[in-house]
Amino acid sequence: MPGSKEIRGKIRSVQNTRKITKAMEMVAASKMRRAQERMRKARPYAERIRRLAAHLSHATASEFRHPFMEVRQEVKGVGLILVTTDKGLCGALNTNVLRTVLQAMREWENKGVKEILTVAIGNKGLGFLQRIGAAVVAERTHLGDTPHLDMLIGPTKVLLDAYEEERVDRVFIAYSRFINTMRQEPVIEQLLPLTGERLGVPEHHWDYIYEPDAEAVIGELLRRYVEALVYQAVAENMASEQSARMVAMKAASDNASNVIRELQLVYNKSRQAAITKELAEIVGGAAAVS
C-alpha cells in the first residue's frame, strides 16, 4: 500500500486537475450560449437567400442555366469542405466527423472518382487530411470563437472555381450538426450542384428585370448562397464544439471527484493501518519491559 505522503500528493494533483476542468466547463457553457445564439441568427439569412435563389432559378430556367445548377451524370472529381475544431478536449466530436469523412472518401473511390480535392476549415481536420495524404487545395484555421464570413470566402471560392472549371463534379461539406446540448451529429451534405431538393420549389413564380444581365446576377447570388451555407455549417460546428466541450469537462470533473473520494478512502485506511501498527509496537514494547 502506498505511503500517506504519496497518497496526499496524488489527491492534491487530482484536485488541481479538477479545478482546471471545472473552469473549462464554465467557460465552455458561457461560449456555448453565444455560439447557439449566433447559429440561430444566421438561419434567417440563409433561408431568405435560399428562397430568392429558388425564385430566380425557376424564373430564368429557359433563359439561362448556371453551372451550379447543372447535374453532371458522370462524377470524375469530388470536392470536400471539412469543418472541424481548432482545439481538442471536446470528446468524440472531431473523431465522429473524421470517421464519416474517411468512409465517404472510400466510397467515392470505389465508385470510380479519380480526384478528391479537399478544403480544411479547422486545425484538427487539416492535420487529418495531411496524415491520410489527401489533396488539400485550401485551408483556414484559427477562426477564434466568432466565425467571420470574409475568412471563409477564400477557401470556399477555390472549390467553386474548380466546379465551374469541371475539375470536380460534386462539392460536399462535412461538419457536426448541432441537435441539442447532449447530441451533435456528423453529417456530409451536398453543396453543388444546387438541386431542387436543396433550393425547394417556390409557391409563386416571379418575373425579374436583370441589370446588367441574368448571368451576372444569378452567378453572384448563387455564390453568396453557397457561402451562406458554409457559414451556417461553421456556426453549427462551433455550437457543437462548445456543447461537446462542456459535457466532456463536466464528465472529467465528475471523474476527478470520484478519484479523490477513492484516494481519500485509501489514505484513511493507510493512516489507520499505520496507527494500529504503532499501537501494536507500543503494547509489545511495554509487555517486553514488564
Image: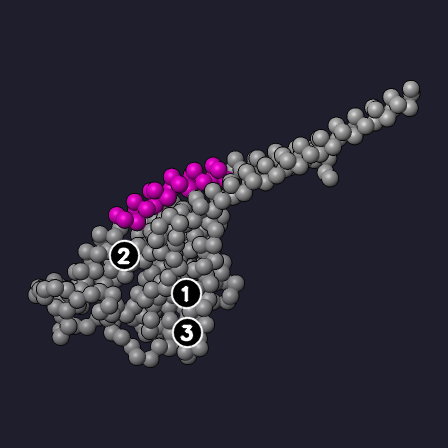
Q: Quadrant of the N terminus?
A: top right
Q: Is residue 200 left or right of residue 100?
A: left
User: Residue at the location (10% across, 64% down)?
Assistant: 204
The part of the image, by quadrant, that contains residue 157 is bottom left
Give the percent coordinates (x, y) of residue 264: 63, 34
Per the image, the residue denoted by label 1 is 118
In the displayed structure, 102 sits above or below 45; it is below
Q: Residues within 10 Å of mark 2 (few under 14, many from 20)?
A: many
Q: Secondary structure at mark 2?
A: helix
Residue bounds of the magenta highlight: 21-41
User: Residue at the location (91% across, 19% down)?
Assistant: 290
Q: Which mark is residue 142?
A: none
- Distance in Å between CA atoms under marks 1 and 2: 19 Å
Q: Residues within 10 Å of mark 3 (few under 14, many from 20)?
A: some
Q: Secondary structure at mark 3?
A: helix
Instruction: Report the amino acid beneath label 3.
Output: Trp
Q: Which mark is residue 228?
A: 2
- Distance in Å between CA atoms under marks 3 and 2: 26 Å
Query: 165 or 195, which lies in front?
Result: 195
Mark 3 and 2 residues: CB-CB less than 8 Å, in contact?
Answer: no
Instruction: Report the amino acid beneath label 1.
Output: Thr
Query: 232 or 275, which lies in front?
Result: 275
The part of the image, by quadrant, that contains residue 284 is top right
Instruction: Report the amino acid beneath label 2.
Output: Ala
User: Residue at the location (27% across, 49% down)?
Assistant: 40
In the displayed structure, 18 sits above or below 79; it is above
Give the percent coordinates (x, y) of residue 71: 27, 75
Per the image, the residue denoted by label 3 is 108
Q: Residues within 10 Å of mark 1 (few under 14, many from 20)?
A: many
Residue 37 drawn in magenta: yes
Camera sees residue 238: no
Majority secondary structure in the magenta region: helix
